[in-house]
């Protein structure tokens, strides 16, 4: 067959393997804040396994460590900076409203 009649063959390109986000020496623990902070979004949400490129077991351990750190107050439940900005703007507008009976 001619090459022009084979449109569905994939081209061979080099594939660079990504390094795993958790090395073998890293210990998943609620006290390891440098490790835990890599798996939290700016809003304070736990990132998904697909985004983190973790195994199921690693994702479970990370989730438990994050929740443990939140309960012990070493990690906030959410990013408070954006929350305060919203409350200030809503406080100004609610003061101007009048109640109709």
Image (cartoon, rainbow, N blue to C red):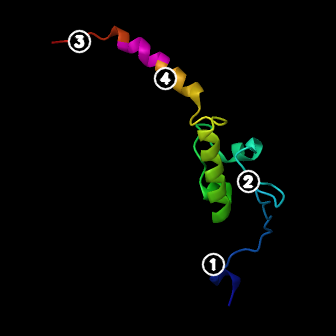
Kindly identify which residue carries mark 2.
Answer: 28
| Majority secondary structure of magenta residues | helix
Left or right: where 12 falls relative to 69: right
Q: Indicate the position of residue 74 as horizontal and vertical percent values.
A: 67, 36
Q: Residue at x 68, y 75 (%)?
A: 10
Label 1: few (<14), some (14–19) or many (≥20) C-alpha neighbours in 10 Å? few
| Structural crowding at the residue carrying mark 4, measured as other residues with C-alpha within 10 Å and reported as few (<14), some (14–19) or many (≥20) | few
Q: Where is residue 61 in the image (x, y as percent from the top left)?
A: 66, 57
From the viewer's perspective, tell me whether residue 10 is left or right of residue 93.
right
Residue contact at pointers 3 and 2, CB within 8 angstroms: no
CA distance separating discs 3 and 2:
53 Å
Q: Residues within 10 Å of mark 2 (few under 14, many from 20)?
A: some
- Contact? badges 4 and 3 (CB < 8 Å): no
> Which residue carries the number 1 mark?
7
Q: In which quarter of the image is residue 53?
A: bottom right
The answer to which of marks 4 and 3 sits earlier in the sequence is: 4
- Determine which residue is flagged by label 3: 99
Region of the chain picked out in magenta, as a range = 88-94
The CA span between labels 3 and 1 is: 68 Å
Q: In which quarter of the image is the N terminus?
A: bottom right
Q: Earlier in the sequence, mark 2 or mark 1?
A: 1
Mark 4 near mark 1, Cβ–Cβ under 8 Å?
no
Q: Residue at x 66, y 53 (%)?
A: 62
In the rendering, which numbered label is found on residue 82?
none
Can you tell which of label 3 and label 1 is closer to the viewer?
A: 3
- Which of the two marks, 4 or 1, is nearer to us in this view? 4
Mark nearer the N terminus (3 vs 2):
2
From the image, tell me which residue sits under label 4: 86
**Which numbered disc, 4 or 2, marks the residue that appears first in the sequence?**
2
Alpha carbon of mark 2 to alpha carbon of mark 1: how far? Answer: 47 Å
Asked if the stretch drawn in magenta spans residue 39, the answer is no
């Amino acid at each position: 067959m001619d090459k022009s009649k084979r449109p569905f063959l994939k081209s061979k390109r080099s594939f660079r393997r990504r390094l795993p986000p958790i090395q073998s020496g890293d210990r998943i623990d609620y006290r390891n804040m440098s490790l835990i902070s890599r798996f939290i979004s700016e809003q304070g949400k736990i990132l998904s396994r697909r985004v983190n490129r973790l195994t199921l077991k690693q994702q479970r351990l990370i989730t438990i460590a994050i929740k443990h750190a939140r309960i012990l107050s070493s990690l906030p439940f959410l990013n408070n900076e954006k929350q305060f900005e919203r409350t200030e703007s809503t406080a100004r507008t609610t003061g101007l409203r009048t109640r109709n009976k």
